Amino acid sequence: MLGLALSLLLLLPSVCQAVLGEPESSVAQDRKFSATKTYRKRTQNVVSVHELVSDALTIREFAANGIIFAVAWNGMSHPDVSQLFGKQFEIFRQQNERVRKLPGRGPGKVDAGNLVVEYSGHMRSVRGRAYLLNQIPPGFSLEDIQ
Amino acid sequence: MASRVSIPLMVAAGLCLSHCGNNESDKAVQKVIVAGTPVSGSNVLSIQVGGGMSVCGSASYPNEPCTSVTLCQVGTSTCQTISDILVDTGSVGLRVFSSAISLSLTNIVDGSSNTLAQCAQFGSGSTWGPMATADVVLGGESAVTMPIQLINSSFKTVPGSCNFHLETSPSFAGFNGILGVGQFREDCGTTCAVSNSNGMYFACPSASSTCSGTTVAVANQVPNPVHKLPVNNNGVIVAMPSVPDTGAWKVTGSLILGVGTQTNNQPLGTETVYLSNSTGNFTTTFNSTTFTNQAFTDTGSNALFFPAAVGPATCSAGSIAPGFFCPTSTQSNTATVAGSSGGSSGSVSFKIANAVSLLNNGDTAFHNLGGTMNTYFDWGLPFFFGRTVTVVIQGKTATGLTGTGPYIAF
């Protein structure tokens, strides 16, 4: 099964956008784009966690069944989500513009149906995450997306 | 210190917005005004929360502490005082909407004549725009020339790291600018001096609509304006009065420059120093959960924010306060705080009331407003009510307090 999935992935044309909602192989694009200096991969049950550490931030990408279903980050700066969110970016962008964060100045949450984006922290210590509700493997806790 | 000002309906009618229901038509509207003990001195900026400021609060957000700063064209007496500036101990640097400035300020360029621009990164989102040099006047202190950010979301193409809640105008943001007087000397520090993928500093060629990540030497970054003062430059004290459980319409307090440098900014002698780590965080334990180096104090956060898992019920998604806490009855809580590398610990009592009930009463300052935030424990503005909180900048010390910044003490 895994072998079949891998073979299919190899047959896919290379994606130019990574990574949320895209095949796990798109992590490679993100490594390049985010100027990753240290890369680690670990596996917990059915979930692979790719950790990309660059100068200003650490990005973690969560994959199951060959698809990236969540990304999380922390560091000095938020990442370039126009890259990190892939095709989901436009959905995020439209909802982000529609929703006036109420009431006030604090953490943000953009709830675009299947796509949920959250961000928080303060200058020099920001973090955030985004996940696709319908891609989260059974038994995986949202608490672990960080 | 709280004074209840009863305003007859005829006077108050003009102030009634959507909060005023029909059944209030036959009773006087009471506005609670709480004035902190005034502090005199050229090193004092007044802070106001609520009370009908023209821009602060116009976006209808509560617990927004604001002040004024004066900007001048470098080396001239051509100056402009800009009101409705958010006082923010959670960030560093002065940032003002270019649309609020009538002065002619010079943009800062790099060695290749590219305009330097910034995506300032906050937990709540971002501000984008070029850097400029201005003479900055805080309170009655002398003017100091320094880089600031001109907030302008129309400048070039906004980079992708600036996509979270980009502040596009004073009316959208609810302020004309941000006065970042947090624990650091510059907004970024070493990372932005050595790596061009820092997400914060950008070089913008005049012929191009896009900007590229760039490095900026620490000395040329947007500084903490307090750090640049010739005196009173080791930190600030935020002194705010207590607010009633039901909230207040207007609260005034003081932002005092310098710590232990003159008679009006001496430590009380009762403070505990909590050292912060390199990103400005210390430790807080609440409800059996320890937020190790994931807690911070921040006047710019408008509530006490912590994870839903350790808090009471949240307000419904369709309410006026989604993501905030809505307990059926007010919760009285105690948390423990400790420095990032251990040291003394202390306890902090706080309350969380029903956010929808609070916000429906028409007031704008609350010590018991709470909301959800993943991972962190954010001691926002409610924490500052009824306290004198000291912030000491990295590498600096204060007479009467033990330790070297970055730290907070209360």
Image: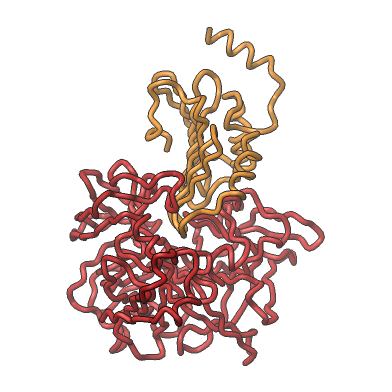
Q: Residue B363, image x and y in percent?
A: 38, 68
Name the residue nearer the viewer: B67 or A12. B67
Report the number of numbered marks. 0
Q: Residue at x 69, y 68 (%)?
A: B109
Q: Residue B21, image x and y in percent?
A: 43, 64
Name the residue nearer the viewer: A64 or B306. B306
Q: Residue at x 25, y 46 (%)?
A: B290
**In the rendered image, is residue B235 in sight?**
no
Q: Quadrant of the N terminus of chain B?
A: bottom left
Q: Colour of chain A?
A: orange
Outermost right residue: B207
Give the answer, above or below, for where A102 lies relative to A111. Answer: below
Give the answer, above or below, for where B74 lies relative to A112. Answer: below
Q: Residue at x 39, y 81 (%)?
A: B8
**In the rendered image, is residue B22 in sight?**
yes
Q: Residue A29, image x and y in percent?
A: 63, 33
Judged left or right of residue B298, residue B146 is right
Q: Colour of chain B?
A: red
* Residue A3 placement: quadrant: top right
Q: Residue B315, image x and y in percent?
A: 38, 47
Give the answer, above or below, for where B399 lies relative to B296. Answer: below
